[in-house]
Amino acid sequence: MTTSLPISASGRISSFWQRQGGLAFFGPLVLLLGFLGVSTAAQRWMTYIVLGVFVLTQMRRFFPVALRQSKILQLACIFILYFQLSLLWQDDFESFEALRSIRTGVVIFLCLTFFGWATVVTDSRNKAMSRAVQIFCFAAVLVAAVAVILHLSEGLSMGRRLGVSGMTKNPVKAASVFSVVLIALMVWRGYFIDLVGRGGLALMVLPVITLVVLTFSRGPLVGLVLIAILGLFLSEHKLIASIFVAITLLFALLVFSGVLDQLEIIKRADSHRFEIWLDAFEKISQKPIFGWGIKDLTKFGASSNIPGWKSPHNLYIGTVFYGGFVGLGLFASMLAVSYRAAIRSFSTSEVGQFALMLLTFGLVLGFFNARSVMINTQSEWLIFWIPIGLLIGLELKQKNVKLAGI
């Protein structure tokens, strides 16, 4: 007769960790949940903890192989290093700002490497990455529903734009993050339909898209319309994709037509984009090759009769301003290689579909917002650097790279 020994608490935790996919599941889940309204400081520490665990457990085995085999990672490292070096030629160099810039570069580099690793270890049997995104979607739908209900409870004569907890001061960030949720719902729609049905999926989409509209942020709406149209052409479920396109387009037309302004549901101030861009172009002409440096504190539009803005509110203009045309060339090279990997994996991987749509959305959003993808590690890297990291992993899979011990 055999006697089974009781499993210790640490043994049960270890078994649960391995069964769920370990760091490849919990890491992306924690990082994504950090964008649902927690404070900036809390989000930053959540990021540091996940990346710290990755560095201690997987970095040494994964990075050397990935750097040799992934052109995306090679170009990303050159891009990050170039903008760190741009601190040397900016006019108003400050040691504290330099340290913050180096921290940002290190965090972005580690995020790229971490998401690349998580994608590599996720295969047909271990859908850790997909499960993490799906749980993130359920949590985001709940947060969106609560935020919309609280917002509408103040009455329809609202003089403010909808934000969410830690995003209150930046509705654009809220719109961007919850647009990512809509993209994920589109990519994994088959999973959600099997789980909650078509009506359930519609109920999940409703509070999220309502939140995005009530932020009155035009850039995310334009990005969503284009992504919805892209999904319509590529989707096997034409009816669902068509409904999504119609709903998104209707909301976008309401915002851009000024109907909401006339009903006094919400008011949107002039963002002075063209004045800011013209001022940025004038400054770019003074240092067109290498730019002004990533931590330059120039304000844009101050020469016009408007308050000066710290950001050019355009990703591409910002990249040229801070890094010159050399920086823009590195940026374009990294994107070209990334898109090649995304297109190759689109038809065979849901993660590849998510990466392609998320990267495309981020680039569309960049026409209306953002300073540079090297400024901070908050909303911009969710939209831009995460899909780049996913594509690093997919590129390694396409090359059938074998990682010892992983």
Image (cartoon, rainbow, N blue to C red):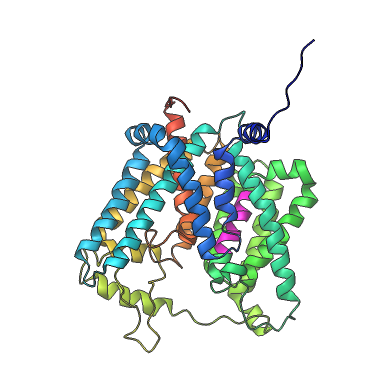
Q: Nearer the viewer, residue 283 or 100?
A: 100
Residue 167 figure quarter: bottom right
Q: Main secondary structure of the magenta part?
A: helix
x, y percent for residue 352 = 52, 40
Which residue is nearer to you in this view: 378 or 400?
A: 378
Location of residue 234 in the rendering, given as x and y in whole percent from the top left corner: 58, 44
Q: Where, quadrant-wise, is the N terminus in this rendering?
A: top right
| Residue at the spot 70% in from the left edge and 28% down from the top edge | 7
Q: Is residue 373 above or below residue 297?
A: above
The structure residue drawn at horizontal position 59% and vertical position 59%, both measured from the top left corner, is 179
Residue 42 in the image: state x and y as whole percent: 54, 61
Q: Which residues are magenta?
A: 175-185
Res 300 → quadrant = bottom left
Give the residue drawn at x 46%, y 56%: 381
Q: Farthest residue to the bottom: give it.
A: 305
Pick the front one: 307 or 131: 131
Q: Position of residue 44 (x, y in %)?
A: 49, 58
Please determine whether, in this image, residue 257 is positioned above or below residue 366. Answer: below
Q: How many marks?
A: 0
**Residue 150 visible (yes or no):** yes
Q: Is residue 86 left or right of residue 130?
A: left
Q: Is residue 330 visible?
A: no
Extreme residue in the top direction: 1
Is residue 305 rendered magenta in the image? no
Is residue 179 shown in magenta? yes
206 to the left or right of 94: right
